[in-house]
Image (spheres, rainbow, N blue to C red):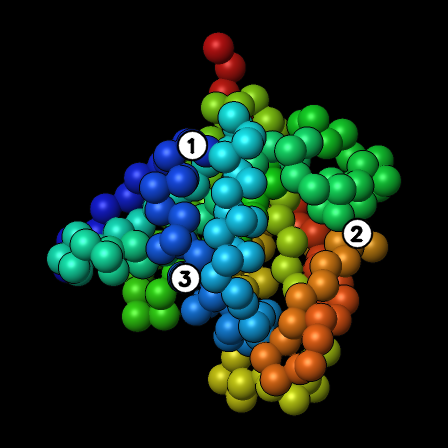
Amino acid sequence: MTLSVRTLTATELLSVITDLARLRIQVFREYPYLYDGDLSYEERYLASYASSPGAAVIVVSDDDRPLQRRLIGAATCVPLVDEPATIRQPVADAGINISRVCYFGESVLDPAYRGRGIGHTFFDGREAHARALGLPITMFCAVVRPQDHALRPADYRPLDPFWHKRGYAPVPGLFASLSWKDLGEPGETTKQLQFWKRETLVASG
């Protein structure tokens, strides 16, 4: 197995949009997101990153796979000022200077490649990009589901311990509200997503 890691700029993202959209749909079908995705919507959503000159995507490929199946993981980041108001405004309302924040969007990885440290690779790459942009705060959101959710797998392990080890902590009372269609549901419903935050040191010079 030969894995390669690349950091793509916003415009370079266009070359992997379809592969990344398919991977998002695959991974976000899992608990806790349970997302019933649509390829056309995903491609439009991801294309919006190309409009931000500060956006970046950390891409991991398995070079031993056939060309059309090489993308096995990706993680996005973008200056928070370039995110939609649904993500940007709650942070601003909490008194955080959004011009100092790099927002981490999706982090998706083919299940067959988990447990190999690629999650750290995603965070390392995005945090390096935030430092290069001079943004000292990094944030992301995680969906909140009830502990007794009917579709919660018996062996489900939240990522909270991993995020804490990376230096992140949930911001008390700070949530975003997003809507999507859950698997098996007739239509979209609104979910609460908890913001996590880390204050990072920005390299001088």
Rendered image quadrant of residue 21:
bottom left
Q: Position of residue 164 (x, y in %)?
A: 58, 55
Compared to 204, does 131 lie above or below? below
- Badge 2 marks a residue whose secondary structure is strand
- Badge 3 marks a residue whose secondary structure is helix
124 vs 160, left or right, is left
- Badge 1 marks a residue whose secondary structure is loop
Residue at 23% of width from left, 46% of height from top?
4
Quadrant of the rendering where the N terminus is positioned: bottom left
The amino acid type of the residue labelled 2 equals: Leu
In front of the other: label 3 or label 2? 3
129 vs 121, left or right, is right
Of residue 168 and residue 175, the one placed in the foreground of this image is 175
Q: Which residue is mark 2?
A: 174
Q: Which residue is mark 1?
A: 11
Q: Position of residue 134 (x, y in %)?
A: 56, 22
Of residue 26 and residue 101, the one placed in the foreground of this image is 26
The amino acid type of the residue labelled 1 equals: Thr
Residue at 40% of width from left, 39% of height from top?
13
The amino acid type of the residue labelled 3 equals: Arg
